[in-house]
Image: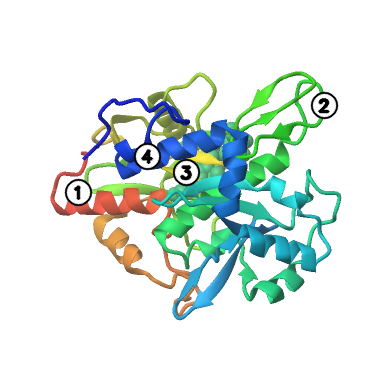
Amino acid sequence: MSLYCGIVCRRKPFWCYRLLSTYVAKTRYLFELKEDDDACKKAQQTGTFYLFHGLAPLLQKSEHQYLPPQHSLSELERLLDKFGQDTQRIEDSVLIGCSEHHEAWFALDLGLNSSSSINAALQKPEIERALQGSFIELRKALFWLNVKDASLLSTAQALLRWHDAHQFCSRCGQPTEKNVAGSKRVCPASKSIYYPQMAPVVITLVSDGTRCLLARQSSFPKGMYSALAGFCDIGESVEEAVHREVAEEVGLEVERLQYSASQHWPFPNSSLMIACHAAVKPGHTEIKVNLRELEAAAWFTHDEVVTALKRNDPYTQQQNGTVPFWLPPKLAIAHHLIKEWVEKSTCSTVPA
Ligand SMILES: NC(=O)C1=CN([C@@H]2O[C@H](COP(=O)(O)OP(=O)(O)OC[C@H]3O[C@@H](n4cnc5c(N)ncnc54)[C@H](O)[C@@H]3O)[C@@H](O)[C@H]2O)C=CC1
Ligand SMILES: [Mg+2]
């Protein structure tokens, strides 16, 4: 229940956090930190930092799970000091969220070349030893993290990558400067403002009523099939992108589009995955694979998909040496789409 009653406090910020629901208060606090550099610097004093090296998050193994440790500002300063680095490097950190009690969370990459400090990147093995953890490539880490940490670290990596790649103004070539939160970069020379971007991607699970269409690119791990995905062209709606991508990749026309869900996907650059179900016209099921985009595409039955969803260790080779057909991991929206199709078709309400 929202406690916000429209009362406007005279204290800064112009709303009173005590009158807001926990969720609204949190979003307003994060908004303030993005807009106000002084407030964000202050938040660093009491906040915590997630560390990366070359865009790989630091993880520590605890019992049966991997967790990303959080470090306070003073711990981070001590670490930099120990390795002969100036604390200006902390200016490269980016705001990635906050707790319900308004403890701000930041991410900092110790391996990328710093735009704030002249010191060279820190050496990975030495920091790993000092912090008793390992920097693990995010694609691998996603298999071991819980959903909350996976989402937070994906956001952090996307933001750190974007800042690393946007250090110069594309209009005049001069260095750009990030605000303290990292929600934008400004070019002092041309006054251009740059905001972190995501590319919209449609991902579609096509059904013919009893089977679903799955495809693989040659770059996928052996045996893995997924739903059809593709970047939206400029000027296109989501619906237009779905029709075009399906026609382009497998030569089919679809109808009855149904939006399912969306997901931020950090690889290889930030994408906003927009997931839909779609159906082919009855009898129009002949696949014409575009071999410039895909290695293979095929229709799979409900039973084949159910078996593949149960496959926990896809890399186990079958006795004849082949790798069995398997599906993207739970955290990928493709998995969600496929599971949803299985559940719907079990209840006989699959989009025809
Ligand atoms: N989270 C999930 O469940 C899944 C995520 N994906 C992601 O979807 C994305 C798109 O899938 P693809 O089949 O590769 O797309 P695609 O079918 O559009 O083909 C990729 C090609 O599109 C062109 N392209 C156009 N705009 C681009 C842009 N903004 N960035 C990069 N290339 C662009 C390039 O020529 C590129 O080679 C991939 O990055 C992949 O990681 C794909 C499947 C499952
Ligand atoms: Mg594609």
Q: Which mark is residue 344?
A: 1
Residue drawn at (41%, 27%) of the image = 238
Determine the image quadrant of residue 60. Answer: bottom right
- The one nearer the camera, 25 or 130, is 25
Q: Earlier in the sequence, mark 3 or mark 2?
A: 2
Residue drawn at (86%, 49%) of the image = 118
Q: Which mark is residue 25?
A: 4
Query: In which quadrant is the C terminus drawn?
Result: top left
Q: Which residue is mark 3?
A: 264
Q: Earlier in the sequence, mark 2 or mark 1?
A: 2
Q: Label 1 neighbourhood size at 10 Å, few (<14), some (14-19), many (20+)?
A: few
Q: Nearer the viewer, mark 3 or mark 2?
A: 2
The residues bearing labels 1 and 3 have C-alpha atoms spaced at a distance of: 24 Å
Q: Earlier in the sequence, mark 2 or mark 4?
A: 4
Name the kind of residue labelled 4 in the image.
Ala
Answer above or below: position of 252 versus 128. above
Q: Secondary structure at mark 3?
A: strand
Name the kind of residue labelled 1 in the image.
Lys
